[in-house]
Image (cartoon, rainbow, N blue to C red):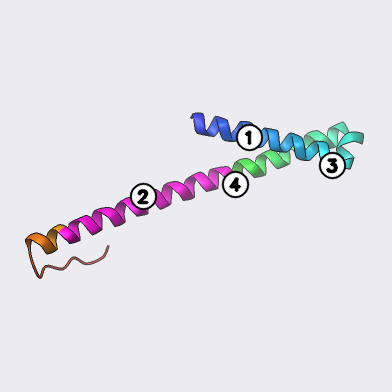
Amino acid sequence: SNEKQRLLRTSLRICGTVVESLPTARSAPKCEKTVQALLCRNLNVKSATLLNATSSRRIRLQDDLVTGFHFSVSERFVPGCTLKAS
């Protein structure tokens, strides 16, 4: 998706900046590639985790809104009716 591509581009820019600032990266090209790969992998894992957490919160919010709507409708049209929280 576009969002994943944007996050990957951002990750790669951050990785490049971090790697360039490491003293060992200037003197050891192989080390640079290893460090960059590791940083990119860690950033991608964190971004995927963040996207999953955001999605999970959105689903919980939707459930809360639906439950609240059902509760308010039940109270309005069936006074005394109580819904159990799911």
Task: State the residue lying farthest toward the bottom.
Answer: 80
On screen, residue 45 versus residue 24, left or right, reads left
Q: Which secondary structure lies at badge 2?
A: helix
51 in magenta: yes
Contact, CB < 8 Å: mark 1 with mark 2? no
Q: Which secondary structure lies at badge 4?
A: helix
Distance (Cα) linking label 3 and label 4: 22 Å
On screen, residue 67 versus residue 34, left or right, reads left
Q: Along the polypeptide, which appears first: circle 1 or circle 2?
A: 1
50 in magenta: yes
Q: Along the polypeptide, which appears first: circle 1 or circle 3?
A: 1
| Residue 51 on image: x %, y % | 50, 44
Contact, CB < 8 Å: mark 2 with mark 4? no
Report the amino acid beneath label 3.
Leu
Q: Along the polypeptide, which appears first: circle 1 or circle 4?
A: 1
Residue indicated by mark 2: 59
Distance (Cα) linking label 1 and label 3: 19 Å
For marks 1 and 2, give the one nearer the viewer.
1
Report the amino acid beneath label 2.
Ile
